[in-house]
Image (cartoon, rainbow, N blue to C red):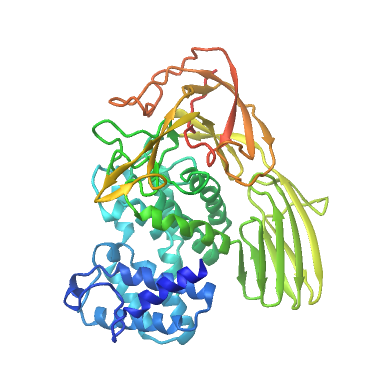
Amino acid sequence: MIARAKKYIDAIISFRKPDGWICPCKDEERKTYDTWAVQLISKTLTFYYECSKDKQIPDVIYRVLKNYYEMLKVGEITLLDWGKARWFECFIAINFTYNRCGEEWLKDLAKILKEQGLNYNESVSLWERPLNRWRFDTHIVNMGMMLKSEAVSYGILNEEYTDNAEKLHEILKNYNGTPVGLFTGDECLSGLSPIQGTELCAVAEQMYSYEILYACTGDKKWAERLEMLAFNTLPATISDDMWTHQYDQMSNQVACVKFPGKSLFRTNGSEAHLFGLESNFGCCTANFNQAWPKFALSAFMHSDDTVINAVPVPSELKADGKYIKLETNYPFENSFKYTVETEKAFTFKIRIPSFAENLTVNGKAANAEELSFEIAAGEKLETQISFDISVCLEKRPHDLNTVKCGSLIFSLPIKYEQKMLEYERDGVERKFPYCDYEYIPVSDWNYAYCSSEFEIRRNGVGDIPFSSQNPTVTVKASVRKINWGFEDGYDTVCAKIPESREPVSEKEEIVLYPYGCAKLRMTELPVTE
């Protein structure tokens, strides 16, 4: 995989023009070319260098950015379309380069990009009442990306940090929020509805924004929001073997079958929720693969000589004479074993989630939002931490409810059969294994909770932690059937709101799956007496 990555990186670099221009277009097309390509490749090269230490990369980034600056400064090019909407993406490479060379033109480049880029604070009125219209300033992937814009830009622009991301996050959540921390967007913002979808690219980009925001601010709310996305939305929209994925996922998703005639989605087609190699459009095929690696890279962060365990996932850190190993099955189990060895003295901090209860450290009760350990040079430390998490009902719009346990959301799973779809498009045969699949429900889904008492069961972690067949953790719940009904015009989409909440059956005990395990699911349900 490393060799394959370098092959492509070297090929991209080899096509640079002598002045540093790296975009794949003819010279006479530069003025009308969308230079999001510059922003994206410079960010990609920055990540590639941090992981590979390929010595040629810093100079390549420098020359690409210098050429970008010189052309923007004289008006030879301007920001267009995606580049205008995603101007802040370039700041990953700008900050990297400025920290290495400190040259003032990088500050000028930063200023030009912000001045020419979209100001999303001026678009919030469009988020409160989404329309069935494709726009850059309501596009869901742009929404996920732009949350980090102040965090990556305020330093080099010499501006005061205002936590603008929180203000925008609150508006998006209030008018387009989902129970798993996403915002609806199929493909643009889609309101407060459990049957509207969210694009997989938005999951990857929103996760990355939260990683940046936590790294920038140290505010634990961003780390907890990151966990919600990583442990629910990312695995939910990808098959167990990671070979197929959805373009759009829904929180109440009773079938993944082509819509008859008119698409339910605001600006996506009727096949965007099918599982396939390239369902609807190829961007998610290329983009979702970055989400897990970046999440892993964010497990540990540092501030000067302090190392912080930001996200408690199974991991090892080897850096600057320090070694830290974390053994855990979180979020399915809530115990953690840390082994620390170091050649140099440093401070080690561990973030404790706000929902943790009955925290213990090496068997002794503790009460803290963050644990801190002073590690002496040559010292070896072993620490055992554990805490409890309660299962609860969380209120949702339309008088619906979601079952939550820490960072895990639980759904009523729906059994299904797969129907393989082989076809030809644009002259390319989409035969197995490059085909799509419809998921056709074969079990009931029209339920309401009839009790707020839940019983959690931990089943042990297997080879596929988010298995759709053998979930690692489940919750037993009491339900009754109701006449839920279908959305008008569809027979494979449940109604946005139940037609009736009156029970039509006796009480049943069912087993809820983690949202990430339930490929067909009901996540937002009413509660009936």
From this view, report whether residue 250 is shown above or below residue 110. Answer: above
Frontmost residue, 173 versus 199: 199
How many marks are shown on the rendered structure? 0
Rendered location of residue 320, percent (x, y): 67, 77
Compared across the picture, whether 260 is left or right of 365 comes to left
From this view, report whether residue 388 is shown above or below residue 392. Answer: below
Compared across the picture, whether 316 is left or right of 366 comes to left
Compared across the picture, whether 33 is left or right of 230 comes to left
Frontmost residue, 366 versus 324: 324
Rendered location of residue 79, percent (x, y): 25, 69
Is residue 188 in sight in this rendering?
no
Find the residue positioned furthest to the left: 28
Rendered location of residue 423, percent (x, y): 30, 42
Rendered location of residue 103, percent (x, y): 41, 87
In terms of image quadrants, where is residue 376? bottom right
From this view, report whether residue 261 is shown above or below residue 354. Answer: above
Quarter of the picture holding the C terminus: top right
* Residue located 36% across and 23% down the image: 486
* Residue located 39% across and 53% down the image: 284
From this view, report whether residue 340 is shown above or below residue 370. Answer: below
Is residue 408 in sight in this rendering?
yes
* Residue located 74% across and 78% down the image: 344
* Residue located 29% across and 57% down the image: 122
